Image (tube, grey):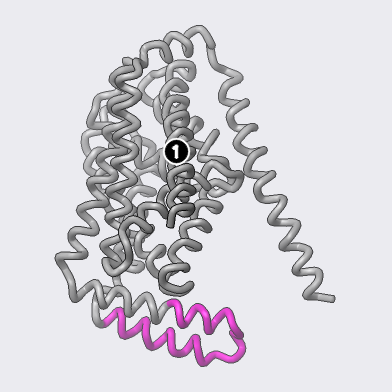
Amino acid sequence: MLRSEKARSRSVWRIARPVLSLALSVGLMLYILSGVDWTVLRRCLRLMSPGYLALAFALLLLNDFFLSFKCFLLRPDLPFWRIYRMFLDMRFFSLMPGGNVASEAARLLTLREMTGTQTAAAIIILDKQTHMIPAQTFCLFSLLFATVPVPRPLVWLALWSLAWPLLMPGALFLPAACAWARKHSHRLRQWKLGGRFARALGEQLALLCDFCQGLARHPRQLRLHLFFGFLGEGCFILTLMLLCGRLGLPVPWWNWPWLSSMMLMAMVIPFSVMGMGVREGAMVLLLSLFGISRSEAMSLPLILSALVLIKGIVGGAIAALDRRFH
């Protein structure tokens, strides 16, 4: 009886989560658009030429390529094209209700086909955590030269977002910390009261220790992993700078690294479709610090959303064709 109730709850949640995601995204978009002067917004959007859009789209594609190579360097024995296709799948599934949850599930599924469930989870954990290092490094340097007063909670959030991946899983690269984690992973696997969850957690922690220690023996590989993370993040920042410059928004270029980081952190919220609504809301709030009106500010995330939408559709089409011919 209890099992059937749990199964029913899971099936209801599988339906409710995408519906809630879609409702949240639509609700946020309608709320933000309610205060927009459409004449001003149309005037801003007309400033964008096809050439600038094509260049911005190319930078977004380059961002995905660098991030794919960053992930590939964690396991160079895996085929690079499968890793790149995984990112194409992620971009497509991020268009679905559930957004980040759906895209990460697609990522896990692709990696699991190549390596196994726990190894795939270890790769995703490490890759997602180390992605915060270049993003927040750019962010903190940019905050030093911010031309507007930045709310203190945002500064603390940026510091914590950089410290967290250095602590976990970064601490596992230290032999003493790794030995401590291994000891507790063994205890978790032996803990009878914890059941299957404790055993799975212990096995995952042990595998993560193995993964980090294996990378520690290849410092050049690890440095390249971080380097391509910086290149990928730099492409996204350049995209925002390019669009902002063409739209004539009065934001000095050295502010974009921290603006980009804050916007991406807002989009981590899983209940959205393609970050829609969350992206626009975060950008409107952040650009208001520079005295930019909601109507002008909305032009940037709308264009970015359109480019991300096109990238997701193109990525899904390429991934589907690749599966058909392989």
Residue at 23% across, 31% down: 254
Residue 122 location in percent, x, y? 40, 70
According to the image, label 1 marks what residue? 314
Q: Is residue 194 magenta?
A: yes
Q: Is residue 5 magenta?
A: no
Toward the front, the furthest residue is: 325
Q: Is residue 325 left or right of residue 6?
A: left
Looking at the picture, tell me which residue is in the foreground, 36 or 235: 235
Callout 1, which amino acid?
A: Val
Picture layout, residue 47 above or below residue 209: above
> Would residue 74 be visible to someone looking at this image?
yes
Q: Is residue 243 left or right of residue 199?
A: left
Residue 231 location in percent, x, y? 23, 46
Quadrant in the rendering for residue 133? bottom left
Residue 107 location in percent, x, y? 46, 58
Picture layout, residue 224 above or below residue 193: above
Q: Which residues are magenta?
A: 176-204
Quadrant in the rendering for residue 258? top left
Picture layout, residue 132 above or below residue 308: below
Toward the right, the furthest residue is: 1
Q: Which quadrant of the rendered structure holds the C terminus? A: bottom left
Quadrant in the rendering for residue 216? bottom left
Count of marks placed on residues? 1
Within 10 Å of the Cα at label 1, are there few (<14), some (14-19), or many (20+) other Cα atoms? some
Toward the left, the furthest residue is: 220
> Would residue 143 be visible to someone looking at this image?
no
Residue at 39% across, 42% down: 154
Looking at the picture, tell me which residue is in the foreground, 31 or 58: 58
- Name the secondary structure under disc 1: helix
Q: Is residue 43 left or right of residue 217?
A: right
Q: Which quadrant of the rendered structure holds the N terminus? A: bottom right
